[in-house]
Amino acid sequence: MANQVSLVDNFEVNFEPSTITIDNYDRLKQAVTQQAEKFKGLIVTEDTLQSAKSARAELNRFNKAIDDRRKEIKREYNQPLKDFEKDVKTLTDLVSVSIDPIDAGIKDLEQRQQAEREKAVLAEIAEIAENRGIDPALIEMKSSWLTKSISGIQRTREIGDAADYIVKEQDRVANEKEAVKAYAEANGIEAAGWVDQIDQGASFVELRIKIDDALMARKRAEEKARKQKEAEDAIAKMYQEKFGNSVVDTNTGEILQTEQQTLTPADDEPMVTRAMKVTTTKTKMWALAEFMKANEIVFESIQLNEEG
């Protein structure tokens, strides 16, 4: 086997670096230069169009002849390399026949080992999470925990640190929520919306400032509404006048408030009907009607004049 490896490592190749040169290069260059100079500076006009096309065709033939010769030499030059690469490919294919199944076997075994390590890590995560009373899914698995290089002690410590951080964070969130809820309720504000913001990353310190701002805004709105109500009441009072036990709007004649005197007749007192004519202002007439309604006195209006 050692001799075979040594033979492969040191296999000899007969290779002679070649040099490509152009015979009589200077004479060829001079001839090409003369041909190019022959048509240099040719001005194309309607009169010289045909000769210009002929000159272009002749120069193109020169170019093609030179380039075709280059391609021919390149093919001949590359052919030994192509033959060499073909022979080497035949040799490497012979080796690949043995390498491929070995490579597949190694990959399969490594995948199974990786799966076993992952299973073991998940079991350890579940155990550590259970001991701390948290959901194992909250512990994010690190790729380094699945490598062969990490020791079991280090992996256990890192998983424990991750679990402890989650517990600490859960406690912080719970305390923050409780603080926000207590502060909101103490100030007469619905707490649910504020508490939900803790789950979105907000802190009690931030939310306390926002709650204070909301309280100030509500206070300003209430103060504004109170002053507006006072102004409206003051304006309305300017047009109110009290007649007896009734408060009347002097603009519309509407009775806004009545402190009615109610009468309590005896249970056996008989009902009587009397016709009467009442002459007074419209406002007082409304007040009289309200009094009779309050005392369950049945009455009907008899039209006597425009003001009746």
Image: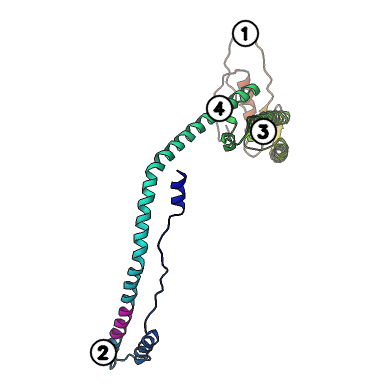
Q: Residue at x 34, y 92 (%)?
A: 38
Q: Quadrant of the N terminus?
A: top left
The location of residue 33, given as percent across then percent down, is 38, 88
Mark nearer the viewer, 3 or 4: 4
The amino acid on which the numbered mark 2 sits, given as a three-letter code, is Gln
| Corner quadrant of residue 130 | top right
Label 4: which residue? 120
The amino acid on which the numbered mark 4 sits, given as a three-letter code, is Ala
Name the residue nearer the viewer: 149 or 23. Answer: 23
Label 2: which residue? 50
Q: Earlier in the sequence, mark 2 or mark 1?
A: 2
Mark nearer the viewer, 2 or 3: 2
Q: Is residue 281 visible?
A: no
Is there a contact, CB below 8 Å, between mark 2 and mark 1? no
Find the distance from the CA under tag 3 to the CA under tag 4. 89 Å
Which residues make up the magenta segment? 56-66
Q: Dot 3: few (<14), some (14–19), or many (≥20) neighbours within 10 Å?
A: many
Name the residue nearer the viewer: 247 or 119. Answer: 119
